[in-house]
Amino acid sequence: MLLYIALILFVVLKSIVRGQCSTGWTRHGNSCYHFSHDKEDWPNAQFLCNALGGYLVEISNAEEGQFLENQSKLFHNIDDQFWVGASDLLFEGEWMWMTSNTRVSTQLIHWAPGNPSNSNSNENCMTFLNDGTWNDAPCSLLFHYTCEKEVG
Ligand SMILES: *[C@@H]1O[C@H](CO)[C@@H](O)[C@H](O)[C@H]1NC(C)=O
Ligand SMILES: [Ca+2]
Ligand SMILES: [Ca+2]
């Protein structure tokens, strides 16, 4: 009997929890987002997002970009930038979302003025600036990062 009640409770609780994001994650649309407190290089940021069950955030539409810009203003200093999941490591100038292996849509492109600059031929990872624009930066620099995962 007790086991039965425990089982029912478990099922009920699980259905309440489903469709929400765990502590430290913010819900938007069908995804949960984690804005990091630490700063990492791009490979480590991707690794840590994976370890948390997600991936470095990928911007699928303008609305998601707007959400990230809004959140960024809450979490970060005005001149801060954070890693997102795109790079042109494979082919210079060809920007890909690395988890989904899809090309960055030309309709969404929102580079900061003068970018992508590929300065010193060594800027192959994408950051997101507080004003919603993008920068290409050396993948080895330490920045905040944002992880995304689908709502469970
Ligand atoms: C972003 O912030 C603006 C201004 O506060 C608001 O109108 C808009 O709905 C927000 N959008 C998202 C996706 O959070
Ligand atoms: Ca580059
Ligand atoms: Ca740049």
Image (cartoon, rainbow, N blue to C red):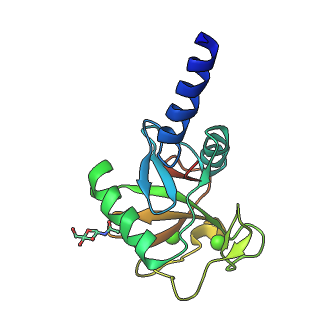
Q: Is residue 35 above or below residue 129?
A: above
Residue most extreme to the top = 2
Front position in the image: 67 or 111: 67
Residue 91 visible:
yes
Front position in the image: 3 or 104: 3
Residue most extreme to the right = 90
Q: Is residue 129 above or below residue 94?
A: above
Residue 20 coordinates in the image, percent (x, y): 47, 46
Residue most extreme to the front = 1
Residue 44 coordinates in the image, percent (x, y): 64, 43
Count of numbered tags: 0
Residue 100 coordinates in the image, percent (x, y): 71, 66
Residue 103 coordinates in the image, percent (x, y): 68, 78
Q: Residue at x 58, y 33 (%)?
A: 11
Q: Is residue 118 above or below residue 152?
A: below
Q: Residue at x 62, y 48 (%)?
A: 54
Residue 114 sits in which quadrant? Answer: bottom left
**In the picture provided, is 35 more to the left or to the right than 137?**
left
Residue 121 sits in which quadrant? Answer: bottom right
Q: Quadrant of the N terminus?
A: top right
Residue 77 visible:
no
**In the picture provided, is 79 more to the left or to the right than 147?**
left
